[in-house]
Each structure stands twice: as structure tokens, then as C-alpha cells.
Image (cartoon, helix red, strand yellow):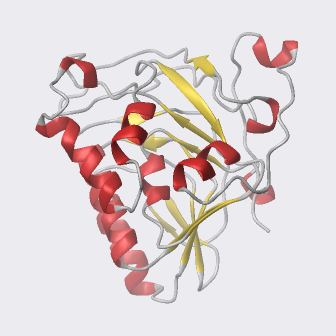
Amino acid sequence: MRRAAALSASIFAVLAVPASAQGRTVTTIVEEWVEVDAGAERLLPAGPSGVMAGPAYGPFRVIDERRAALVDATDAFSPAQFKAMLREHPGIAAIEMIECPGTDDDTANLQLGRMIRAAGIATHVPARGSVRSGAVELFLAGSSRVIDDGAEFAVHAWQDSDGLEPGDFAADSAVNRAYVDYYREMGLARPQAFYDMTNAVPNDTALWLTAQDMRAWLGEGRDGDVTVAAPTAALTAAPTIAYLDLGARLP
């Protein structure tokens, strides 16, 4: 298939360096790579994410009759799980993007994004919410998109099962056009520039974006500037497992 990224096999490393502690930085991911036979993956794991109460539909958890949370990677089953969630909870109008490492299947992920947009559902990344890799496409699918100060994003280039990345294909190839077309469909003013930004670092690294960075790409202004502190020694040391308290992420 077109894309296959890292699947962490034993040590879930890195990633949960808070956006409030860094500006736009590149962080190396320590992972064990395994080959996948089908589907397409693009995710940046951050370790065990904890448990959120509420009915579960794959990576989604129902918070109440108006909101659901995304707390895990999506996969080939996610579109059907999302459809089942809306069938049983038709009043859901917003997705809280709390701990979103990416996707195990990019084809299904883009389908899911289009389903979110077609349903008119908003996306919201709360303070300390983390949206990484393939999950960024789902955030962009929101009928309205809200980012709280202190939220973080991470992007990187895709890689297919043969180890090829975007630059190994012609810029106007079908594999590259698919993502530019999706960004255009989701209303980004500069879809090609956004795609180029996501591919600015190789698949085995990550480009971290603050709430302010992502707001600028959405064309929603630069209000609510995020205070960015200089990285501390603890943050520049070897990556460690990050345990996330999902219960603390929602208002």
C-alpha cells in the first residue's frame, strides 16, 4: 500500500514533550520497526494512554450525548466504529482530540475524516491535547476547529512498505495528490504548502507544532499567543515513556 510508518513493538518512546516547553522543534523517535503487509500506518505513539470512562467505539469514547473523545490510533475498522457511534448517539456534535497518536491505515483514516466532515462534527484540541501524525487529518476534518493554548501537534513524512517517502515520487503523482486534494477539500488555503510542511522531516522523526503554529496554518489568525519556554535539560535528555491522564484533559 501507499504508506506504512513505524509500529512501536516494545518500548513506546518519546513524544509527549509539551508544546508549552518548546516551539517548532524536531524530535527523534526511538522505535523498533516492523513491516506490515497491508493497510497503511502513520502514527507517533506516546505510551499507555490510560482509560477513559464511557461507551467505547474503537478509538472513540462517548463523553456525553453531545461529545466524543478520540483517545487512540485509528485503523481499518474505525470508519465502521464511528458510524456505529453516531447511530447510537446521533446527537454527537464535537470530538475532543485528547491523545491521538495517528493511524494504522491511512486509507481508512482519510475516509473517516470525510465522514466527520459530512456529519458536520466539530473538532477541539484541549490544553495538553496531543494530535500527531495521521490524526492531524482528522482534526482538519472538523466542521469547525478549535485549538486551546497548550495543545500540541506533530507531523512527519509518510513512508510506504518499501521504505519510500514522498520525495521518492513525482510531486504530481497520485500518491502525493491524494493528500493535497484532501487538504484542499478540508478547506486549507494553502494545501500544497501544508503538505510540504508535514513532509519537512523524515518519517522516523517529528516536527512539533504549537497551538499558535497550527492556528496560523488554518488561517485563523495569531491571537492567543502561546508562551514557549526554552527546553530544559530534562526535555532534551533521552526520550522516556509518557503516561497520560486523560481524565484531566477535558473541561
Q: Say which quarter of the image contains residue 226.
A: top right
Residue 142 seen from this side: yes
- The quadrant of the rendering that contains the N terminus is top left
Residue 47 seen from this side: no
Q: Residue at x 33, y 76 (%)?
A: 118
Q: Say which quarter of the image contains residue 97.
A: bottom right
Q: Residue furthest left?
A: 174
Q: Residue at x 53, y 71 (%)?
A: 144
Q: Residue furthest bottom?
A: 91
Question: Looking at the picture, how far across and down is residue 90, in whole percent?
Answer: 45, 88
Above or below: residue 18 compared with residue 245: above
Question: Looking at the picture, how far across and down is residue 45, in whole percent?
Answer: 54, 33
Above or below: residue 170 compared with residue 217: above
Q: Is residue 80 left or right of residue 43?
A: left
Q: Is residue 15 left or right of residue 31?
A: right
Question: Looking at the picture, how far across and down is residue 231, in whole percent?
Answer: 82, 20
Q: Nearer the viewer, residue 2 or 39?
A: 2
Q: Say which quarter of the image contains residue 224.
A: bottom right
Q: Residue at x 47, y 73 (%)?
A: 143
Q: Nearer the viewer, residue 160 or 177?
A: 177
Q: Nearer the viewer, residue 49 or 23?
A: 23
Q: How many marks?
A: 0
Q: Residue at x 52, y 82 (%)?
A: 92
- The quadrant of the rendering that contains the C terminus is bottom right
Q: Is residue 75 left or right of residue 237?
A: left
Above or below: residue 175 compared with residue 113: above
Question: Looking at the picture, how far across and down is residue 242, in whole percent?
Answer: 71, 32
Q: Nearer the viewer, residue 141 or 245?
A: 141
